[in-house]
Image (cartoon, rainbow, N blue to C red):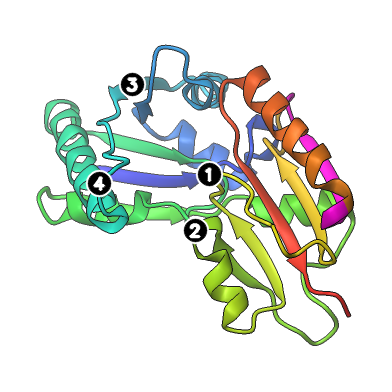
């Protein structure tokens, strides 16, 4: 058996020639189905269908949102591994996982496939995709870091901890909500559902644009049924 882990960016328009060739060589795509109206599953179906590849939708195990975060994620991943293992044992052949964005950045597909490879005779490889921070920078026509400086990529869950540690230029992903109180004078470049018909953008001083962003975020979620947003946050010079 073989697995191709394929980064597909933020939709069909971001599928590289390399990724397209790999996908056409697969027998099927394995994709998690989170609910009956899963917009991201629909996007994966569109990508796979454009290249003549079947999608095997696997009901996504629920994640315990009340439990300790790391323990809950570990349990969730284990349940996913077991579900995908059943499909692979039944079908064999060459399967693809289509990763939204790039597989290297805040995605667990590689970890899950590593665990599958410990249980099954699997060969696997990884093909890169356009990442959300790349697209955010392109949309806002900015460089993610100041001249000669770093950009710290983190999550909304860790934002306050990272600022307290001295980070002043942060690309923040995986936001359950926007917690920016006390940062009104920082600069913000924000985007949601990038590369999709429900894309939303905003930029400016946090204190000036936060209400606009909250409304745009709610609107993107209502229109798509889901929202994935990120932002670049930079301290005053």
**Disc on res. 57:** 3
- What's the distance in space between the residues labelled 2 and 3, CA to CA? 30 Å
Secondary structure of residue under mark 4: helix
Q: Where's residue 10, x and y in %?
A: 64, 38
71 relative to 86, above or below: below
Left or right: residue 220 compared with residue 129: right
Secondary structure of residue under mark 2: helix
Secondary structure of residue under mark 1: loop
Left or right: residue 166 compared with residue 19: right
Inspect this view and state whether residue 59 appears.
Answer: yes
Pick whichever of labels 2 and 3 is earlier in the sequence: 3
Q: Mark 2 points at which residue?
A: 157
Residue at figure coordinates x 19%, y 49% from the top left: 116
**Placement of the N terminus among the 4 image quadrants:** top left
Q: Nearer the viewer, residue 23 or 173?
A: 173
Q: Mark 4 points at which residue?
A: 77
Can you tell which of label 4 and label 1 is closer to the viewer? 1
Q: Residues within 10 Å of mark 1 (few under 14, many from 20)?
A: few
46 relative to 199, above or below: above
* Residue contact at pointers 4 and 3, CB within 8 angstroms: no
* Residue contact at pointers 1 and 2, CB within 8 angstroms: yes
Q: How crowded is mark 3: few (under 14 residues within 10 Å), some or many (20 or more)?
A: some
């Amino acid at each position: 058996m073989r697995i191709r882990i394929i980064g597909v960016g933020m939709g069909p328009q971001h599928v590289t020639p390399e990724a397209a060739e790999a996908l056409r060589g697969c027998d099927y795509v394995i994709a998690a189905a989170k609910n009956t109206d899963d917009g991201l599953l629909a996007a994966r179906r569109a990508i796979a269908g454009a290249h003549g590849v079947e999608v095997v939708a696997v009901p996504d195990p629920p994640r315990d949102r009340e439990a300790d975060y790391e323990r809950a994620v570990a349990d969730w991943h284990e349940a996913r591994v077991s579900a995908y293992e059943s499909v692979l044992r039944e079908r064999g052949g060459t399967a693809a996982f289509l990763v939204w964005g790039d597989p290297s950045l805040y995605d667990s597909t590689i970890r899950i496939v590593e665990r599958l490879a410990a249980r099954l005779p699997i060969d696997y490889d990884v093909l890169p995709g356009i990442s959300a921070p790349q697209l955010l920078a392109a949309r806002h026509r900015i460089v993610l870091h100041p001249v000669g400086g770093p950009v710290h990529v983190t999550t909304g869950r860790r934002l306050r901890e990272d600022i307290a540690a001295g980070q002043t230029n942060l690309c923040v992903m995986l936001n359950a909500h926007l917690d920016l109180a006390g940062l009104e004078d920082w600069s913000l470049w924000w985007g949601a559902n990038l590369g999709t018909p429900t894309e939303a953008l905003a930029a400016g001083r946090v204190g000036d644009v936060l209400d606009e962003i909250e409304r745009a975020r709610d609107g993107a979620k209502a229109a798509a049924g889901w929202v994935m947003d990120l932002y670049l946050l930079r301290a005053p010079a």
